[in-house]
Image (cartoon, rainbow, N blue to C red):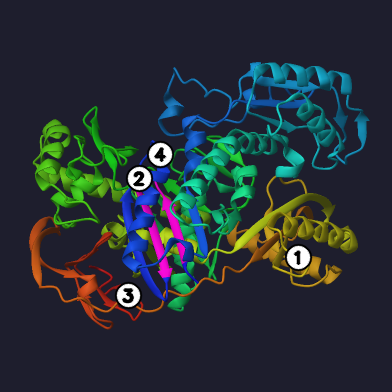
Amino acid sequence: MTALATDIGGTFTDVVLVADGRVHVAKTLTTPDDPTEGLLRGVRRVLADAGVAPASVDRFTHATTLATNVILERRGAAVAFVTTRGFRSMLALGRQARVEEERYDLAYSPGEPPVPLTHTFEVPERLAADGTVLTPLDEDAARRVAERVADLGVAAVAICLLHSHANDAHERRLASIIAERLPAGTPVVASSEVWPEVGEYERATTTLMSAYVGPVMGAYLRRLRDRLAEAGITAPVHVMESAGGVLPAGLAASRAVYTIESGPAAGVVAAAREGARHGLADLISFDMGGTTAKAGLVRDGRPGVTHEFQVGGKGSFGGRRPGTGVPIKVPAIDLAEVGSGGGSIAWVEAGALRVGPRSAGAAPGPACYGRGGTLPTVTDADLVLGYLDPDGFGDLRLRPDLAEDALARHVAKPLGVDVVEAAAAVHDIAGAQMGTAVHVVTVRRGIDPRGFTLVALGGAAPTHAAGLAERFGIRRVLVPARCGVGSAVGLLHADLAIERSRSFLAPAAAADPAALETVLADLEAAGRADLGLGDARGRVTRSVGLRFAGQAHAFTVELRPGPVTRDVIEAAVEEFYARYRESYGIDLRDPAELTVARARVSLPAGAADPGGADPPRPAPDRTRRAWFGGAFREVPVRERTACVPGERFTGPCVVTEPQASLVVPPGWSGVLDDHGAVSLEREDADA
């Protein structure tokens, strides 16, 4: 199989091609005005390097930050929102938390609602919590609302009626009435189709974001498909979804909300696979690119998955603080993200040094890129400290003089220090901020990170990984081969997958196994239909939500394979008790209740394994001045492509490759394995 994977980030676009067991990679600058331009540039390069005809590509997988960026930058489609009478102000009221410096801001102003009240409508209807019709849908009023929506000329409509998770009849009829009044093809998105679970506000925002992003995603994917066809690539396009699988392009457009964590999820998939190759099951995925740094947890070989997260969340919770962003209720790999990447801009405010979250991006980029950027970034600081190779990072030649000038003007002079001290301070602050993401997914959840292995992915991660590990007492760091394009490598092995869910409220002790079996079977059938699979194809994972009676939040617990029986439900309850004790340190055995049934249908990717490392290419030994222990030292610089399996590295040293630079501090040593990965270990706990 010839497989092509592409990942578009805020600064770089990564492309990986696997053909005949060989791997070819390209890292190009992202082209914000037209992301397909940078992507096609990388695709043409790897195809030429491999000598592969475009028509021979069998599989094309793609990760993009498009959905996230559309929401954060508020440039989605014009959307109307329709809900039950009496709930028109639900989105405007929302749920908001004031965090960090906002708590002391006397002039604090809440953010604008995702949809203005001028585009929000209500219809007379009402369901009870169990789905019983209390007030029938007023179809005459619904038609009047449809006419008003049509007059607005919106590109999509989102519908979320009260308790429609228990009975979708009103939503389906309302969607039909509205669709009749709109131009053909205008998306009308109903919450009972997107995510039919308890929780009106979260269900409403999830549905709304799917409608908001869907037209933009659809247009983008059509353009991508056309550009690929022009280049001779006719393989179907699959898009990474937030929970670690891929979706057909058509499904990704109609359920765009599933792709919000597209790129970051691929990195955790790659980390889990690399850990399994080394026999490591407990990992911390650390993915640092040009714009952000992400941390995710892999336990027992499986990435953690959450069913509610925030888009645009902020504060010291790695972007996951409830009430600080737009809540989304779809399955997503559990990540904490901070605005601290290689392109994060350093600046001084009121005598204090800040780093990020604003990024220099791809245009103009860090000052050292020589593309017109004048503001100092983390990359500029790392170059001044000797951690990066001035002779090249991918296709770029780095300019130390421009980096020094930017740091001197914007950091060193305002703080009254020299350029090297300024660069070291920027490097340290960036490391502390990245530590916040790791802290969120481990310490804040009662997990001791010291027994985990840190897996470094992304172009900037190997430069900071060992220092980050030292902050948490982590003794092992794994740096995969081609780590600079690690997320794209993860895409190669992502399964075709979709998850369906439905509310199922019942006390666990009295839950009807046959009723739960029926619901799960229906969800499986719907998932297979989504993916175009036959009745017998695909792998199915079943799970339920469980909580203590009276609580608001539930744990997702996987069910044992096979039909649902009383024993299966009781085993799930025991697993819930264990998970609760592990998370909160409290051993409770109070009555539990089921909240939701979930079925995830997946089809294994069947991608070819890239095989071993490329044959070494001789390179001369050299040294470079680099900053270690508060002073510059002349340290060895090794080319990873020139090293042979079994070769050891002893810190301090720097190991370079075209897409990344691995910094090995004093007290650390590493070895290169047969697959080109470097395993670093801390030799002295007090180093």
Please name the residue that numbered disc 4 is placed on. 34
**Residue 534 image label:** 1
Q: Secondary structure at mark 1?
A: loop
Q: Quarter of the image holding residue 669?
A: bottom left
- Compared across the picture, whether 369 is left or right of 573 comes to left
For the residues bearing labels 4 and 1, Cβ distance under 8 angstroms: no
Q: CA distance from mark 2 to mark 1?
A: 39 Å
Q: Reading the chain from its start, which is encountered first: label 3 or label 1?
A: 1
The 10 Å Cα crowd at callout 2, few under 14, some 14 to 19, many 20 or more, is many
* Comparing labels 4 and 2, the label whose residue is closer to the camera: 4
Please name the residue that numbered disc 3 is placed on. 676
Identify the residue shown where x is 47% and y is 45%.
65
Of residues 4 and 322, the one drawn nearer to the viewer in this rendering: 4
Q: CA distance from mark 3 to mark 2?
A: 27 Å
Please name the residue that numbered disc 2 is placed on. 30
Up-down relation of residue 100 to residue 369 (above or below): above
Q: CA distance from mark 4 to mark 3?
A: 34 Å
Of residues 544 and 121, the one drawn nearer to the viewer in this rendering: 121
The 10 Å Cα crowd at callout 3, few under 14, some 14 to 19, many 20 or more, is many
Q: Amino acid at mark 1?
A: Gly
Identify the residue shown where x is 77% and y is 41%.
192
Image location (x, y in percent) of residue 330: 63, 48
